Image (cartoon, rainbow, N blue to C red):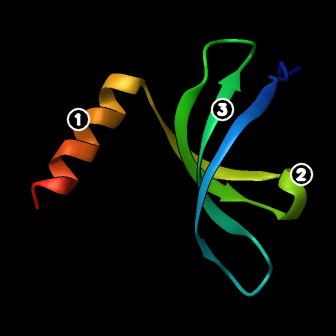
Amino acid sequence: MAESFKYEITEELVVLSENARGWTKELNRVSWNGGEPKYDIRAWAPNHEKMGKGITLTDEEFLTLRKALLNE
């Protein structure tokens, strides 16, 4: 049996896009299984009831990405 995991969106930062079915691609701060919140980019169903695949970044990874994008 697969183990479930817990998540809490601690801060909603920005909605990047929305598709015709109402799913949104968002940048949020998410705590996974009670851990420290991390930056998270993924697709969410309306009301955050389901999620798609995404990427989670530590604070350091996020700052590196931000710096690279600002230097573009």
Taking the view exactly as shown, the residue that stands out farthest to the top is 35
Considering only order in the chain, which callout, 2 or 3, is on the residue closer to the N terminus?
3
For marks 1 and 2, give the CA distance.
30 Å
Q: Is residue 21 left or right of residue 72?
A: right
The type of residue carrying mark 1 is Thr
Q: Nearer the viewer, mark 1 or mark 2?
A: 1
Q: Secondary structure at mark 1?
A: helix
Which one is earlier in the sequence, the residue at label 1 or at label 2?
A: 2
Q: Position of residue 14 (x, y in %)?
A: 58, 58
Residue located at (66% from left, 12% from top): 35
- Residue 19, quarter of the rendered image: bottom right
Q: Is residue 25 left or right of residue 10?
A: left
Q: Nearer the viewer, mark 3 or mark 2?
A: 3
Q: Quadrant of residue 9?
A: top right
**First in sequence: mark 3 vs mark 1:** 3
Tell me the residue that label 3 is attached to: 30
Residue type, numbered disc 2: Glu
Q: Position of residue 10 (x, y in %)?
A: 72, 32
Residue shown at the point (54%, 27%) measured from the top left: 38
Q: Quadrant of the C terminus?
A: bottom left
Spatial CA distance of label 3 from label 2 is 14 Å
- In the depicted structure, whether residue 69 falls above or below residue 2: below
* Pointer 3 local density, CA inside 10 Å: few below 14, some 14–19, many at least 20: many
Task: Give the structural element (helix, strand or loop) at label 2.
Answer: loop
Q: Which residue is mark 2?
A: 49
User: Could you tell me how far apart the alpha carbons at marks 3 and 1 are, in whole angstroms?
Assistant: 19 Å
The residue tagged 1 is 64
